[in-house]
Structures are given as structure tokens and as C-alpha cells.
Image (spheres, grey):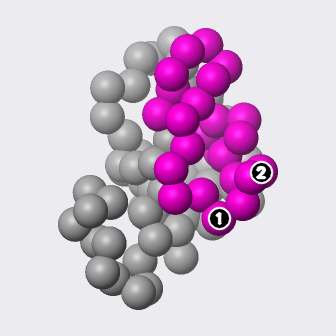
């Protein structure tokens, strides 16, 4: 997905992949602190993204507060 939009000057794709318990691979982040704790936990953190794409998510790893903050579907994350 990141390669598909690499030439787009408007869209930035951020990838977050859990590599181990409480450890994450973060690609395309804007700062060293962005998504350091994993998936956004608050509405404010989540709403920084225009869209979110999830794949192969274990039910036990999802956080209810993050799931309900978006009020709908979860969709890798594209930052505005």
C-alpha cells in the first residue's frame, strides 16, 4: 500500500505492525513518538488519521476504547 501511494504528495501512509507483545514496527510515522504505544487509545489520537485499515487483528489485542472512539469500522492508517 505504501508503494502504491509513494508518489502522492498529499497522502501519507503510516503502518503499525505488532512484532511481539508490547512491541511494534512503525513505518511512515511523522515523529519518534507517533504510535509508540501501539494503536491509538483515545479519540484525539485516532482522529489524527483520515482512515484506518486493519488486518489479521486478534480479538484479545483490540482495545475497546480505541474501537469505540471511531464509532464505526476500522480500516494501515492514512494521516492527513
Identify the secondary structure beneath mark 2: loop
Does residue 73 lie above or below 3 as drawn? above
Residue 33 in the figure: left or right of residue 38: right
Q: Which residues are magenta?
A: 17-40
- Looking at the magenta stretch, what is its main secondary structure? loop
Q: In this view, which residue lies farthest toward the left?
A: 4
Q: Considering the image in quadrants, where does the N terminus appear?
A: bottom left
Which label is found at residue 30?
Answer: 1
Can you give x and y, in whole percent of width and height, for residue 6 in the image? 32, 72
- Tell me the distance, in whole angstroms, between the alpha carbons under discs 2 and 1: 8 Å
- State the residue in front, 51 or 21: 21
Residue 11, can we see it?
Answer: yes
Can you give x and y, in whole percent of width and height, for residue 42 in the image? 73, 47
Can you give x and y, in whole percent of width and height, for residue 51 in the image? 43, 62
Q: What residue is shown with label 2?
A: 33
Q: Residues within 10 Å of mark 2 (few under 14, many from 20)?
A: few
Which label is found at residue 50?
Answer: none
Residue at horizontal 60 percent and vertical 39 percent from the top: 39
Amino acid at each position: 500500500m505504501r508503494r502504491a501511494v509513494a508518489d502522492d504528495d498529499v497522502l501519507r501512509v503510516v503502518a503499525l505492525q505488532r512484532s511481539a507483545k508490547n512491541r511494534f514496527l512503525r513505518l511512515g510515522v511523522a515523529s519518534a513518538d507517533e504510535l509508540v504505544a501501539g494503536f491509538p487509545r483515545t479519540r484525539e489520537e485516532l482522529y489524527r488519521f483520515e482512515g484506518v485499515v486493519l488486518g489479521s487483528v486478534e480479538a484479545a489485542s483490540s482495545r475497546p476504547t480505541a474501537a469505540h472512539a471511531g464509532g464505526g469500522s476500522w480500516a494501515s492508517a492514512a494521516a492527513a
